[in-house]
Amino acid sequence: MDTLATTRSISSIDLMVRLGREKGLSVAQCLQGTGISAHQLEDPECRVTGAQELQVIDNLVTLLPEASGLGIEAGMRYQLTTFGIWAFAIISSPTVRAAIEVGLRFTQLSFVLVRFAFRETPGRAEILMDVSHIPPRLRQFVLERHLVIFLLLSREMMGDELMAPKEIHLTLDHLPFKVMPAALTNCRLVLGSEDNRIVLDPSQLSRAIPKANPATAEFCVRQCEALLDRQRRQTGFPSEVRSMLIGRVADMPSLNEAASLFNMSPRTFRRRLEEQGSGYRALMEEIREGVAIELLETAGLSVESVAERLGYAETASFIHAFTRWTGMSPGKFRRR
């Protein structure tokens, strides 16, 4: 699953913008490069992509370079209700194993950016966290946030009987211990690991969940299935490609590379777009135009800087493209 292409509620971005504002940033600074306006933060029906959420994280990390533990602070702002029906499907499951399975089955309904997987072998149970698709400088924030959210869901699921991990292995070289939740310091923490994983005691998997309710669990799963089906029908394949491009606007992949990202042949990739009245080059142009307009209107960047952020080697090429899109030069567009 491409977690950067999936859509989700804007509420997670709203939480991070609030964090940024408390740290002295403006809303515009937090939303720079996302294509999201301030008034959309107040719209609970607004849908955004994982790529847009990652851009907000990029802005926080870039503009708050001295802040330590930003991901942990962000993660501690999430509540059970933030995750909606997905979280209730988890905590109403009969056992820990069932909760993990339903959580992974419907991660597209959450704010997950990490690619999760569950691996169970004799005497060992692990939740794997793949961040290879996340830019290296953002992985600290993303891993911190996801670890805290995991602990939040564990606490809500088990009540006072916290399902504490046996071990946590991270590729990170440090964690800000002063702001870490106690549950993260009460287990064996292995930093500088080859991968990222949460190791559980396999005997915990069969434990009954205190809030388990078969009727509620069945209802929540049906709701999750309906939401996932509706989400897929509303977005369609061009929307998935569009979301992928937003996350790679400075270095857009070729058609062959894009097809590979979706595990398709170039021919199938092109046909899927054409079936829905779209094309790859048209989508690339659409994204570049939208991001260029957003940067010129709100970010206060020079034309040269906008061209660079969009991946143009020469400013003249960007000016020519922008004039073709809008009928006016970037400078005239800004002065209008």
Image (cartoon, grey):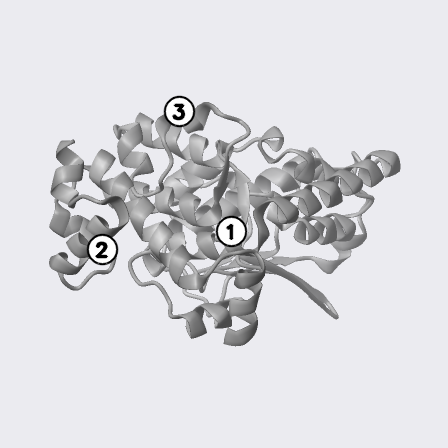
Q: In this view, does 158 lie above or below 306?
A: above
As displayed, is residue 212 above or below residue 97? Answer: above
Comparing 11 with 286, the one in front is 286
Determine the secondary structure under disc 1: helix
Amino acid at pointer 3 = His
The residue where tag 3 is placed is 39
- The residue sitting at 51% across, 40% down in the picture is 182
User: For the residue carrying disc 3, how many other residues have a C-alpha within 10 Å: few (<14), some (14-19), or many (20+)?
Assistant: few
Nearest to N terminus: mark 1 or mark 2: 1
The quadrant of the picture occupied by the N terminus is bottom right
- Identity, as a three-letter code, of the amino acid under mark 2: Ala
Structural distance between the alpha carbons of marks 3 and 1: 22 Å
Of all residues, the one furthest to the right in this rendering is: 215
- Of residues 44 and 204, the one nearer the viewer is 44
Q: Name the residue under label 1.
A: 239
Q: What element carries label 2?
A: helix
Which residue is label 2 attached to? 321
